[in-house]
């Protein structure tokens, strides 16, 4: 099933649109970090995957959402900046966009409203 068939229209974000964590997103991101650090005390990938799944289920998120929340912990970023930072971690650019859209709908991430354009200089005749 494609995005157009799912019934939810894809949001058109401008390229320069920046996103930041909401207060709920900051809390979820901090909790994600705690859960992952605690999972390191146990050996193996299974403990990591189990910790991510438990964290996601508790917050009704996707297990991969912690990656995006952690990426925004350092400050506002565009989707392109996030994609570049996560290059080599697995998610494709389309996955990053879908995750950001999902996190915006869940109010974990919020788009930053750019400041209004400055008024034009006065005309001198």
Image: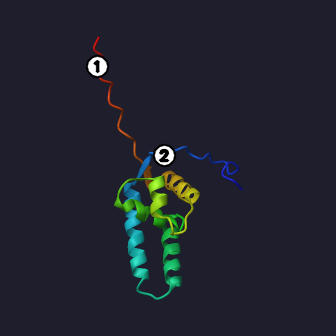
Asked whether, in this view, residue 14 is left or right of residue 75, the answer is: right
In front here: 34 or 122? 122
Residue 65 at x, y percent in the picture: 50, 64
- Residue in view at x 51 percent, y 69 percent: 89
Check disc 1 and report its element: helix, strand or loop: loop
Disc ID at residue 122: 1
Q: Is residue 97 above or below residue 71?
A: above
Which residue appears at 49% of the width and 79% of the height?
48
- Pointer 1 with pointer 2, Cβ within 8 A: no
Q: Secondary structure at mark 2?
A: loop
Q: Nearer the viewer, residue 117 or 99?
A: 117
> Left or right of 71: which side holds 13?
right
Label 1 vs label 2: CA separation? 30 Å
Q: In the picture shown, does residue 120 fall above or below 58?
A: above
List x then y, in percent, for residue 20: 39, 53
| Residue 120 location, quadrant | top left
Q: Which quadrant would the C terminus be assigned to in this image?
A: top left
Please count the marks in the image.
2
Model colouring: rainbow
The spot of residue 22 in percent (x, y) is 39, 54
Query: Residue 98, relative to residue 44: is it above or below?
Result: above
Rendered-image quadrant of the N terminus:
bottom right
Residue that lies at the very extreme toward the front in this rendered image: 125
Residue with the most extreme top position: 125
Q: Label for residue 106?
A: none
Mark 1 or 2 closer to N-term?
2
What residue is shown at x 28% (from left), y 14% (from top)? 124
Residue receiving disc 2: 15
**Image check: 24 left or right of 97?**
left
| Residue 47 drawn at (x, y percent) | 50, 83
Q: Residues within 10 Å of mark 2 (few under 14, many from 20)?
A: few
> Dot 1: few (<14), some (14–19), or many (≥20) neighbours within 10 Å?
few
């Amino acid at each position: 099933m494609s995005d157009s068939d799912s019934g939810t229209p894809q949001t058109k974000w401008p390229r320069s649109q920046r996103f930041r964590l909401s207060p709920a997103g900051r809390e979820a991101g901090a909790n994600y970090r705690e859960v992952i650090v605690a999972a390191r005390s146990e050996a193996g990938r299974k403990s990591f995957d189990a910790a991510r799944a438990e964290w996601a289920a508790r917050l009704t998120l996707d297990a991969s959402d912690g990656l995006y929340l952690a990426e925004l912990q350092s400050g506002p970023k565009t989707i392109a900046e996030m994609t570049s930072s996560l290059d080599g971690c697995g998610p494709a650019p389309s996955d990053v966009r879908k995750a950001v859209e999902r996190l915006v709908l869940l109010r974990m991430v919020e788009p930053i409203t750019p400041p209004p354009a400055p008024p034009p200089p006065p005309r001198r005749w």
